[in-house]
Amino acid sequence: MGRLIVVSNRVSPSTGEGGESVGGLAMALSAALRQYSGVWFGWSGKTTPEFTGQLHIETIGGVTSATVDLEEIDLEEYYNGYANKTLWPLFHYRIDLAAFDRAFGEGYGRVNRRFAQTLAPLIEPDDIIWVHDYHLIPLARELRSLGIRNRIGFFLHIPWPAHQVMINLPRHRQLVEAMFDYDLVGFQTAEYQQAFEEYVFNEADGAMVRPGCVRAFGRALEVGAFPIGIDAADFARMTKSAKARRMHNLMSACTVFRHLIVGVDRLDYSKGLEERFIGFERFLQQNPDQRREVMMLQIAPVSREAVEAYQEIRGRLDALSGRINGEFADVDWAPFRYVNRNYRRDELAGIYGAARVGLVTPLRDGMNLVAKEFVVAQNPEDPGVLILSRFAGAAHQMQEALLVNPNSVEEVADALARALAMDKAERIERWQALFEGVARDDVTAWRDSYVAALTKNDREARRPALVV
Ligand code: GDG
């Protein structure tokens, strides 16, 4: 195999030293690329008055990145627009928040074309190309139109919605048709893969060639579920670092004789933060004897601040956290800490480790890496309990967590009570099973299984011979 070229909207290689504050996709890709000689291509995060296609090449932490600036209007229409105001809410079942604006669709097409034009000259005949996430669905189509015949795979980090939700997107067929220019499309779970297949059967007159291969639009496409994992060994190492230990001690010191409940999420409406806050409030209301026994810490660094829906939810969360403390705090004690700051990864590891409960309750989530990080950071002899939304992709693998419906305030409150009362033997038993899974199905296993599937057959044998 030649080089692995990874393409994603943002490129943020991590040094692996624990200092960065980056999202789930970036963490996973940094870890995946470190061991490959490869290139990571995407947007630089900067804008320029006019698109030039000039590449910035850098090597950080063993990963070579090649990035390109975009115009301000690209940022508005493609990134803030089609990606984050149209596809993100729709794929997370928030049709009410999805904006359908023709200019967004045009910007999305234009940026994908620009990416393809900039990337194409870098591609050598043996390279394989791995495209990531909803920002770049039509990239293969654009690359093919420039004559690129390499193997190109796509991985969707977020859910693929049910067929009836998907058809709310104007020109959904066009978007799905473009996916058939990939050789392999990977999803986080079998459920999302099935939802995609259902769309193909119902809307595109498609058919199953065999399990893992569907046919539509005159082409065949390999599809599969590849649940993403974390770099568990690296995260375990980080939990023992000086910064993690310091943070652990700090948290233990401010929760003496109390249990810490922790949540860590990008501030995003898909993460179920409002429902979670109200669930915690309900727990305090229903368990007066427990009030002074617990403290909840929610870390929620702000994200996508240019999008109104994110500004609105931020305001609502500020009000809710104030209400909870106003209702229950005493002169010497407050039950809830809500911080919008970013922490280093090693500090997060220390915070997770000091918690008795990890509260991970997204309304919808492609996978959710926080749940996996929480498990790795626990003390095997006295582990905390993971409460996990059944609507996170991670729930399929993490059945030993306390699984809840995040929309039900009662279920969240009851799960908190159950987790806090759980005896050590049960906590250890559940944790061991969870840890085994997280350590086994780690980011390396994810990368290797995806790359193996993408390189399975000889490229020339499949393209364009797969026209059926
Ligand atoms: C997308 C999908 C899928 C959070 N706060 C801080 C911080 N984080 C880190 C966490 C974790 C990552 O960000 C969040 O990952 P998630 O998986 O929970 O969520 P998304 O960002 O929405 O990721 C998701 C993922 O892609 C991978 O495929 O699992 O479903 O939505 O690593 O630790 N990191 C630091 N400081 C913070 O304050 N350093």
Image: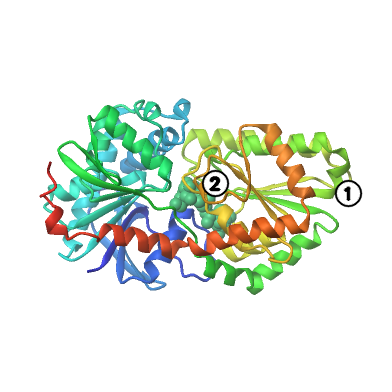
Count of numbered tags: 2
Q: Quadrant of residue 207?
A: top left
x and y percentages locating residue 331 in the rendered image = 89, 45
**Relative to residue 295, is residue 460 depicted above or below?**
below
Which image quarter is the N terminus in?
Answer: bottom left
Query: Label 2 CB, ligand 1: below 8 Å?
Result: no
- The residue type indicated by label 2 comes to Ala
Instruction: Please tell me which residue is depicted at 61% across the width and 36% down the height of the picture.
Output: 406
Q: Which residue is mark 1?
A: 332
Mark 1–mark 2 distance (CA, rounded to whole Å)? 38 Å
* Amino acid residing under circle 1: Asp
69 left or right, relative to 249:
left
Closer to the eye: label 1 or 2: 2
Q: How packed is label 1: few (under 14 Cα within 10 Å), some, or many (20 or more)?
A: few
Sequence-wise, which precedes: disc 1 or disc 2?
Answer: 1
Q: Quadrant of the C terminus?
A: top left
Instruction: Determine whether 121 is above or below 163 in the image.
Output: below
In the rendering, at what x and y percent does residue 466 appear?
14, 47
Q: Residue at x 65, y 68 (%)?
A: 244
Whether residue 163 appears in this view of the structure is yes
Question: Which residue is rendered at x = 77% and y = 51% of the image?
Answer: 422
- Does residue 384 appear to the left or right of 101 in the view shown? right
Mark 2 closeness class: few <14, some 14–19, many ≥20 residues within 10 Å = many
Asked if the residue at label 1 sits under 8 Å from ligand 1, the reply is: no
* Residue under numbered circle 2: 395
